[in-house]
Amino acid sequence: MPNPSRPRVAALTAACALLSSLVAGCGNEAHDGARDEGLTAQKLTWKDCPAPSQAEGGGGAPSALPHGGAWQCATMKAPLDWADPHGDTVGIALIRVRADGDRSRRIGSLIFNFGGPGGSGVSTLPAFGDQYAALRTRYDLVSFDPRGVGRSAGVRCENDQQLDAYFQQDSTPDDATERTALLKNTKKFNAACEKNSAKMLPHVRTTDAARDMDLMREVLGDRKMHYFGISYGTELGGVYAHLFPKNVGRAVFDGVVDPTQTSEQGSLGQARGFQLALDNFADDCTSKTEDCPVGDTARDVEDRIAELLRALDRKPIPGIFPRVLTQSAATNGIAQALYAKEFWTYLTEGLEQAYAGDGQTLMLLSDLMNGRSENGEYSNLTAANVSINCADDKPRYSTSYVQERLPRFRAASRVFGDFLAWGMVSCTDWAVPGAADHPDVSARGSAPILVVGNTGDPATPYEGAGKMVDALGRGVGVELTYKGQGHGAYDSKNKCVQAAVNGYLLNGTVPAAGTVCS
């Protein structure tokens, strides 16, 4: 499954480009060069937003928010290669809605990144804009398509028909023939990325996106970067804070990536996280007064799911014609439903249908994870996700290595273990080398950053919040715990979480470290 959080289910050639991903000095020189180019003095032309491109997920143009909040879009120029600021540029697509409160109390821009990597901020922010109404009283709400995503020179790999076949493949091979097929399909996908997007692939690192954000801050006229990062957006925010600690204003990290982990450790952590969420779903279903339609006990629910997946491995069932529901698509759909407690109803419905031989709902959930619309067209979520992960992550894993690690993954989750373990081969034959084992987010001298961890988070397990706080450094990270379910905390609408986040972003009030919301 493409990974909407940065622990990966899932790069850099010139010496300066490689070093800039590891230390701030080289990249800061490149940033100063961009200032000489006049990019920081560019004037953005804000216009009514068009309908999202297919690469951004398609759909209609964003509707205005209540109280006259019209969405505006613009394109910012940034260096294609931050080590060569006098070279080619790339367009970064932006979206904003202006603050609706007293202009004298306006703080500045609040920049959002909703995760992925590979998610379009231009299409996502309007979809959730009304949830941030309180923040709009003092901020312009701003988001963007990071480089390689959506309209920001979006990476292209395989076409829609090829992607349908790619997602139908057996991604948990049981024998040598299936392992060979998986590796062949992975090489084919990666080769298509190189063929169609060779120019962008070396320049989609998280460090590149962080430098784009600092340019964005200046172009928007803000002295400080005020930021709300969710999921992978917390890693992006941490990298920004490392590169530009003195420029950090008020920042919140929600649904927090563990920045100390390698891609293997991240995948293993996700196996545990999704298993925990599945356990919680099963406990919730079987603890209700009425009968749980997908099992009598929590153990029975999970036994039946495991048996369903084994049966689908042997023989898929009808999905959304002409596609069938495979073991991989079903696992993907189950994982998607665990991202929010509100989706648990759809998971129950999807499992009931699948037990009766109908795979439509689980396939719809899988399509949502993969960025496939009802008309059969894909966003570039998967292409961007793989490209950014492989550009960032130095490790490259062989099939033999994955086979050796399978017992650990299976111990973490009998449902998701194999799936996440085999996802580690996605970068094996990538055209560009990865930058580092894990990101550097140390940010001595930064303003406080509020780090919100959710104890029931499947995609970015709760422990990552504490690791982020430690990695940011003494006096920077301030941890807030939410005892809840789903990915992230603010959008759960928990009043305690929202009061703490709003209090910091709007008034600068830092909650006490270790605050717990439930």
Image (cartoon, rainbow, N blue to C red):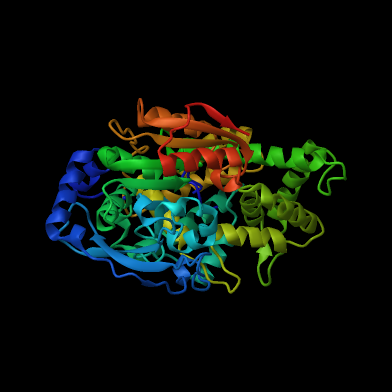
- The spot of residue 53 in percent (x, y) is 45, 71
Picture residue at 46% right of the left edge, 36% below the top: 451
Picture residue at 22% right of the left edge, 56% below the top: 81
Residue 306 appears in the rendering = yes
Picture residue at 57% right of the left edge, 68% below the top: 373
- The spot of residue 422 in percent (x, y) is 53, 46
Image vertical order of residue 357 relative to residue 448, above or below:
below
Is 506 left or right of 374, judged from the image as shown?
A: left
Picture residue at 74% right of the left edge, 46% below the top: 305
**Closest to the observer, 189 or 216:** 216
Task: Single out the residue that lies furthest toward the right.
Answer: 290
Task: Count up the numbered dots.
Answer: 0
**Closest to the observer, 383 or 213:** 213
Residue 429 appears in the rendering = no
Image vertical order of residue 233 relative to residue 191, above or below:
above
**Closest to the observer, 510 or 304:** 510
- The spot of residue 350 in percent (x, y) is 74, 56
| Quadrant housing the C terminus | top right
- The spot of residue 52 in percent (x, y) is 46, 70
Choose top left, top right, bottom left or bottom right for residue 497: top right
